[in-house]
Amino acid sequence: MIDTEISPANFVDKVNEIEREVGKVIVGQREIVRGILTGILAGGHVLLEGVPGLGKTMLVRTLGEVLDLQFSRIQFTPDLMPADITGTTLITEDGAGSKAFRFQPGPLFANLILADEVNRATPKTQSALLESMQERRVTVAKTTHVLPEPFFVLATQNPVEMEGTYPLPEAQLDRFFFKLNVTYPSTEELVEIALRTTSARPVLGMRVADAGTLQAMTYLARELPIARPVLDYAARLVLNTHPDREDSPRLIQRFVRFGASPRGMQSMVIAGKIRALLDGRYNVAFEDIRAVLHPSLRHRLNLNFEGEAEGVTADQLLEELLKATPES
Amino acid sequence: MRRVTIDQLPERQLAACVRAFSQAYRLRLAVRRGFQFLIVATIGDVVLLASIKLGPVAHSHLWLAAVPLALVPAAMLWAMLRIPESRLVALDADRTLGLRERLVTAIELRQERATGHFRDLQLADLLARVERVKPRQAFPIRLTRQEILLLAIPLAVLLSLIIGVQPQAQPAPEARKLQQVVKQEAERVNAIADAVEAEAVDESIASAAAKALRTAGEELERDPRSVEAALAALSAAQERLLGLQAQHAGDLEQAMARAAQALQQQAETSAAGSQLARGDVDAAAESLRELANKQNEMDQSRRGDIAKALKAAASSADAAAPALGRSLRDAAAALEANAPQVEAALKRAAGDLRQAGADAAMASRLDQAVAELESSKSNIEQSDPQTQSTGSTPARGEGEGEGQGRDTAPSSREGSRAAGELAADDTQPAGQGAGKGTLERTTDVFAPESLGARPELDASPEMDHPSVAPSDRAGGPMQNEALVDYREVLANYRDSATAATQDRYIPLDLRNVVRDYFSSLEPQR
């Protein structure tokens, strides 16, 4: 039953219900599912990084079905043009024979967008997508078209094929709420995947929520209180990602060119609220901030040449950051 | 803590919760602060006790150990009375009880007067969790291992200082006094070395003597605490000086005195003899030079008288100053033969006389230095509390010189007075002792009758040793505070007397009397 009235008491139930339905189709990847769902509930967009064939498209499609949201997939290629994703104006002829320009919406006009291998498209096409992610609207031929709500983009990057790609610039990466690393499934999960996908009966997820429910859940999550010491902790974590700070860990001072923006803190706070709510609590705790630190900030740290040469990862630096930053 | 009852209003419950947790917080803080101050106090007491045990700080400052310890209850009281910020209490409770910041959030929501349905839900969630909390059990007072180690280590050191390290045998003030005295004597010895070098005529002997003295001074400065080392260094310097002095035996002074007497027998040379007897060697040599200049005007009779005097003086000087004896004899022979080289011979004799005077002065200076070293040894011994506490019997005097006289045992006061009189009596005519015969050196205590010694200074027959005070006869400590132990003042009088013999025209032979007198008064070792 779809419920547009969400209380704190059944927020968790609703999320569990959604995850359960998704879990009928998608094997494993519980953290990815939770992360994507957090991104949706936060009104943000998520960047997935993982090898092909891990069910990213299936995941987004299933979410669309469970959440009763329109789903659209865009495969980014080097020859993809901005108009291919935003839409274009066409000359159409009506029944009376008169011709007029009509806007033909592109695949961007959906609730759930899967932007597959976004780093393969040219920067021009990337910016068309990223701009629409930020503005929630598209302007074509001087006419602005508002994108539907909710609007969620799940972009993917292939870490294997980096040749001939256009890595997203740091300013664009900052627009993503979360960056999630998709890991390869375990043996048991692979077996289960095979069983489900090679049988004669496809498994489908049931619709348990809709846009209204999601909006109510989003609003409820943002209402969750957060104490000042916890906010201070999140702020110190973000500030300590900058190498010019005295309190920054030694590794960050050595390997980071510049650190996270205030969007990183926004991401941590909202994600922390959602996590606390999902944990059955009515306030954000220090551990919530720590739990969402990696997905919130790993794509917002810009490594310098030495960091890249040494092969240091953002996750390693964030671990060091956690150790070096006390709660109070 | 009273259990927070469910029927109370949630706000009151929250307030009661915060109060209970605040009390627990203050108690834990008080214990922790007290422990930290205890660590600091223990370390401070270790430093203080070590300083007292090992020397620099006086034992009377032991009360200072109580000062840091007094800070412990003060710090605890302050921590108990001071009301902490509710946010700190809340964060502490959240951390201790695993509330995941529920309490601090609830307090902030109340302080900000926030609205919304989470406000009440959050508080209810909190109260449900703290309802059964008992603060005394929930907030145990625990100390970290590091804190315990920080106390255990200095405590162990403190106990070892109290039990293990024995205090030094002598109290700190006496030890300081001894060090002070040794350092003063070191300076004195160095000053003596400078004086010997400055007054020297024979540079080789003077530099050797100064080197020996400076070596002793360095030894004293190096270890001012050790009485034995100081006495050994001074004794070594004395031996070296006596060894140098052997080349210029005390006989030289007597020889000069006898030569002076011989010259005084004749009118022509009586002036030179008197000057020599006074110790004015330069004047005596100048008189001989004048004789040399005037010898052409003299008749043979006068020449013969002069030659006779010179021969007698030569005989007196032969043993101690052969060069002088030869030159005097040559001059006498030239006078008798009316040879043309009379003037040169007389002048040569004058030069040799000056040299002999310088040698005698060097011998006397070395003598004085030896006496001053003896005085330094005495001062150091007197400053040694062990010597004072054992109440060692004054030793029979062992002077560098010898004197003839009766065995006397002057009381400390009388002996000191005699020495003082001797030193202070500036009117005593020079040479009063001269002509009374050769003085033989003796180790017995005596007061020369020629100096007006009083009979009551004589020792009673049954006494073997000089008395310090009547009470000392029974071997007990001095009871009469009016009496002063003569050993305390002996060095001062001896120094004054020695200085007087150098600075004033005192007959050479009487200088030995002075020296022997004070040597005989030295405490027996």
Image (cartoon, rainbow, N blue to C red):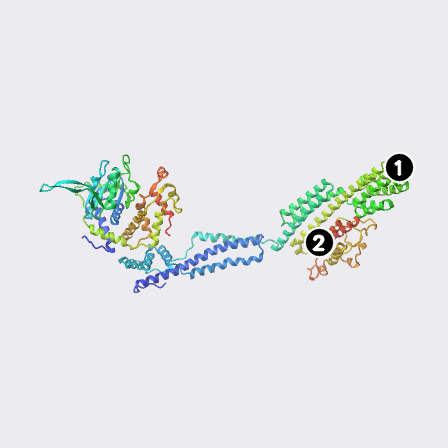
Task: Say what amino acid the circle numbered 2 marks.
Answer: Asn
Task: Point out residue B288 in the picture as x, y percentages from the top left corner.
Answer: 83, 42
A10, above or below B351, in the image: below
The residue at which mark 2 appears reads as B492
Dots 1 and 2 on the same chain: yes
Dividing the picture into quarters, in which one does residue A294 lie? top left
Q: Residues within 10 Å of mark 1 (few under 14, many from 20)?
A: some
Foreground of the two, B88 or B381: B88
A43, above or below A124, in the image: below
- Left or right of B47? Residue B209 is right
Foreground of the two, A185 or B513: B513
Foreground of the two, B294 or A25: B294
Task: Point out residue A129 in the picture as x, y percentages from the top left corner.
Answer: 24, 42
Q: Residue furthest left?
A: A96
Separation of marks 1 and 2 at Cα, in angstroms: 55 Å
Is residue A117 visible in the rendered structure shown here?
Answer: no
- Left or right of B306? Residue B172 is left
Q: Nearer the viewer, mark 1 or mark 2?
A: 1
Q: What element does badge 2 sit on?
A: helix
Residue drawn at x 20%, y 52% is A212
Q: What element does badge 1 sit on?
A: helix
Residue drawn at x 63%, y 52% is B180
Task: Point out residue B495 in the picture as x, y percentages from the top left corner.
Answer: 72, 52
Q: Residues within 10 Å of mark 2 (few under 14, many from 20)?
A: some
Task: Say what amino acid the circle numbered 1 marks.
Answer: Ala
The residue at which mark 1 appears reads as B337
- Left or right of B161? Residue A142 is left
Could you tell me which chain the residue with mark 1 belongs to? B
Is residue A166 visible in the rendered structure shown here?
Answer: yes
Could you tell me which chain the residue with mark 2 belongs to? B
- Left or right of B301? Residue A210 is left
